């Protein structure tokens, strides 16, 4: 890369919204009742990416290695916490002394 930031224009943003609208209309037609979740998820995604862009711009502008590492570790910890919250624990039946792991 040449160090230039990737610019996302209005037309590219509008194109992504077309796909979200197609999914929303499909949900309405099939009566899946996912419209509210889709709208909330879309707004959250835009807000998070917008704010994260400013945070990363600041972190890379100051060029402090420990701050970059700290932000990286916080992002990894947050991702691990989210994944851990989504994984359901399964109960494995034990059948004696040499029970096999539950896959």
Image: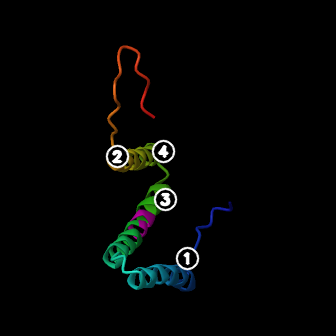
Q: Secondary structure at mark 3?
A: helix
As measured in the structure, the alpha-carbon distance from the residue carrying label 3 to the one carrying label 2 is: 28 Å
Residue 102: where, in percent of width, then height? Answer: 42, 31
- Which quadrant holds the N terminus? bottom right
Mark in the foreground, 4 or 1: 1
Return the residue at label 1: 8
Return the residue at label 3: 61
The disc, 1 or 2, on the residue closer to the chain's N-terminal end is 1
On the image, which quarter does residue 32 sit in?
bottom left
Which residue ends up furthest to the right in the rendered image?
Answer: 2
Return the residue at label 2: 81
Residue 88: where, in percent of width, then height? Answer: 34, 45
Residue 86: where, in percent of width, then height? Answer: 35, 50
The disc, 3 or 2, on the residue closer to the chain's N-terminal end is 3
Q: Is residue 72 shown left or right of residue 12?
A: left
Q: Residues within 10 Å of mark 4 (few under 14, many from 20)?
A: few
Mark in the foreground, 3 or 2: 2
The disc, 3 or 1, on the residue closer to the chain's N-terminal end is 1
Tags 3 and 2 in contact by the CB under 8 Å rule?
Answer: no
- Give the residues drawn in magenta, as a range: 49-53
As measured in the structure, the alpha-carbon distance from the residue carrying label 3 to the one carrying label 1 is: 20 Å
The disc, 2 or 4, on the residue closer to the chain's N-terminal end is 4
The structure residue drawn at horizontal position 41% and vertical position 79%, both measured from the top left corner, is 27
As measured in the structure, the alpha-carbon distance from the residue carrying label 3 to the one carrying label 4 is: 11 Å
Q: Residues within 10 Å of mark 1 (few under 14, many from 20)?
A: few
Return the residue at label 4: 65
The structure residue drawn at horizontal position 45% and vertical position 82%, both measured from the top left corner, is 26
Q: Secondary structure at mark 1?
A: loop
Frontmost residue, 48 versus 39:
39
């Amino acid at each position: 890369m040449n160090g230039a930031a990737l610019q996302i224009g209005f037309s590219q943003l509008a194109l992504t919204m077309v796909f979200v609208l197609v999914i929303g209309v499909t949900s309405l037609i099939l009566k899946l009742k996912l419209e509210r979740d889709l709208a909330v998820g879309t707004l959250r995604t835009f807000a998070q990416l917008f704010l994260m862009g400013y945070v990363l711009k600041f972190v890379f502008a100051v060029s402090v290695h420990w701050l970059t590492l700290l932000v990286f570790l916080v992002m990894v910890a947050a991702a691990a916490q989210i994944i851990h919250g989504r994984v359901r624990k399964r109960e494995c039946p034990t059948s004696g002394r040499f029970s096999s792991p539950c896959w």
